Amino acid sequence: MTTEMPTVPEEILSALRKHKRVLVAAHARPDPDAMGSSLAMAWTLRAIGVDALVFNEDGLPPFLRFLTLPGPVLSTPDSLPCEPDLVVCLDCGDRARLGDTLQPLLDRVPTVNIDHHLANPLFGTEANWVEPGMAATGELVAYIAKALSVPLQGALAEALYVAISADTGNFSYGNTTPGAMRLVADMLEDGLNLPKLRDAMENNWSEARLRLWGRIMQKVRILEDGKLAAALITLEDLASCHATREDSEGIVEQLRRLSGVRVALMLREEEKDGKVQVKASLRSSGKDNVQAVAAQFGGGGHRNAAGATIALDAEKALTVMQPYIRFVWNRLQ
């Protein structure tokens, strides 16, 4: 099977070919698309003779430790063996999403920006490729690998599958493209062991995660005549279950399974500089645009999957967000 490829901008391919020391970075607190794309890009660059390293301010998420790495995931600029010639920025709606520690380096080193988020400001100083119609940044990286004649096999294919499957809800969200499905078919034909990979992705829960999910599900709030389901995760919830923020991943997707729910919301408290803030995650289906809600609070994402960070505790954040969420379905009536 041959995947019909979009045209990868020549300035992207030229930048990747000509630089010999490349740092691959994605947004802080990486999700599977951010980290999967980073690993896949590093594998791709190494295949064409480029010395590529992976950086993320928050390191490799524990739930992705089953992936084969092209090298350690560096988390501080001091850990770099030398200054790179280029930074490849992946899955970042803006430069700030890369985190505070990398910003001084970005002021000195050329950057390439590869992303699929709406309203990306094209912050790359050497080249930009932003395609909001793509299912995941991993999809763009796959097309780059193909354009560079790098086979989608082995660890590269596993990283790409994790990236694409996560951002499409295992190929169930409205952003799932025919191209994404064809890429997976190509990888399967080239030897991707899907049952083994799915087992590693899904059957890795800790007891702390199980306890947290049980606690939070008991407290889920069904609001707005059943159209809104909200899960509030406090610092106390996390501490009581000995859980981490990563243990809450997936809860918001489960809320959307409730019949009649049009918007699912998860508000997870975090502490920063001694103050409580929340990470808001929103999910919807069809025409219900939660990206518009996230944008009101300085966040972003996609129509059916978006998020924002709000400088309030969970209870107050729910109060201020609820009117904006209500507008999502009122505007369609």
Image (cartoon, rainbow, N blue to C red):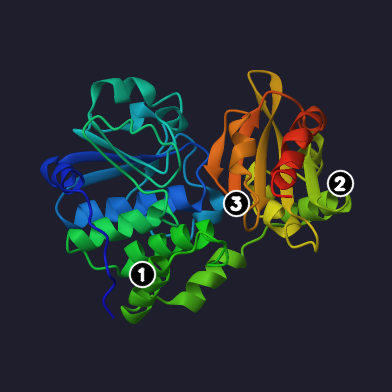
Q: How many marks?
A: 3
Q: Residues within 10 Å of mark 1 (few under 14, many from 20)?
A: many
Asked if 22 appears above or below 259 in the picture, the reply is above
Q: Nearer the viewer, residue 27 or 201?
A: 27
Do we see residue 136 in this rendering? yes
Task: Give the quarter of the image for residue 173.
Answer: bottom right
**Pointer 1 with pointer 3, Cβ within 8 A:** no
> In the rendering, which numbered label is found on residue 304?
3
Do we see residue 70 in this rendering? no
Q: Nearer the viewer, mark 2 or mark 1?
A: 2
- Rounded to the nearest angstrom, the CA distance separating label 1 from label 3 is 22 Å
**Where's residue 61, x and y in %?**
52, 47
Is tag 1's residue or tag 3's residue first in the polypeptide sequence?
1
| Secondary element at tag 1 | helix
Q: If the image is split into quadrants, where does the N terminus sit? A: bottom left
> In the rendering, which numbered label is found on residue 183?
1
The amino acid sitting under disc 3 is Asn
Asked if 235 appears above or below 161 in the picture, the reply is above
The amino acid sitting under disc 1 is Leu
The amino acid sitting under disc 2 is Leu
Is tag 2's residue or tag 3's residue first in the polypeptide sequence?
2
> In the rendering, which numbered label is found on residue 223?
2
Is tag 2's residue or tag 1's residue first in the polypeptide sequence?
1
Task: Give the quarter of the image for residue 274.
Answer: top right
**Where's residue 16, x and y in %?**
18, 45
